[in-house]
Amino acid sequence: MPGMFQSFDAYLRPGAMNEKSIAFQLLDAGWDVWIGNNRGTIYSEGKNKKPFEWTDQASHDLPNFLQVILINSQYEKIDYIGYALGAT
């Protein structure tokens, strides 16, 4: 999950030395990559910016996102990369 006030595209941007983003490096290495998104970004569904608490992301959004990955990938276990609020 991206950091506070960021969206999924933070994982798609090239690095400081213009190297491939972390998402594309992991894809090239053979990993399945699922990138979550925060509420209230320009990519939010319907662009409806309903009020929410930041703790909603940790208590609802992240667990639901991980559950969707487990169900759809049929893996028993996943590795998770996140930072800032995305790593609470």
Image (cartoon, helix red, strand yellow):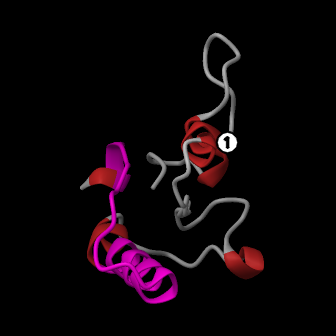
| Residue 66 sits inside the magenta stretch | yes
Judged from this view, the residue extending furthest toward the bottom is 71
Q: Residue at x 73, y 60 (%)?
A: 42
Question: Could you tell whether 69 is left or right of 13 in the image?
Answer: left
Residue 60, compared with residue 44, is above or below; it is below
- Name the foreground residue: 30 vs 81: 30
Q: Residue at x 44, y 45 (%)?
A: 3
How many marks the image carries: the answer is 1
Main SS, magenta region, reads helix
Position in image of residue 51 (x %, y %)? 49, 75
Residue 70, compared with residue 6, is above or below; it is below
Position in image of residue 67 (x %, y %)? 38, 84
Position in image of residue 80 (x %, y %)? 34, 56
Question: SS at mark 1?
Answer: loop
Position in image of residue 52 (x %, y %)? 43, 74
| Residue 67 sits inside the magenta stretch | yes
Q: Residues within 10 Å of mark 1 (few under 14, many from 20)?
A: some
- Name the foreground residue: 28 vs 85: 28
Judged from this view, the residue extending furthest toward the front is 30
Q: Amino acid at mark 1?
A: Leu
Quadrant occupied by the C terminus:
bottom left
Q: Residue at x 56, y 51 (%)?
A: 30
Q: Residue at x 72, y 64 (%)?
A: 43
Quadrant occupied by the N terminus:
bottom left
Q: Which residue is mark 1?
A: 12
Q: Which residues are magenta?
A: 60-86
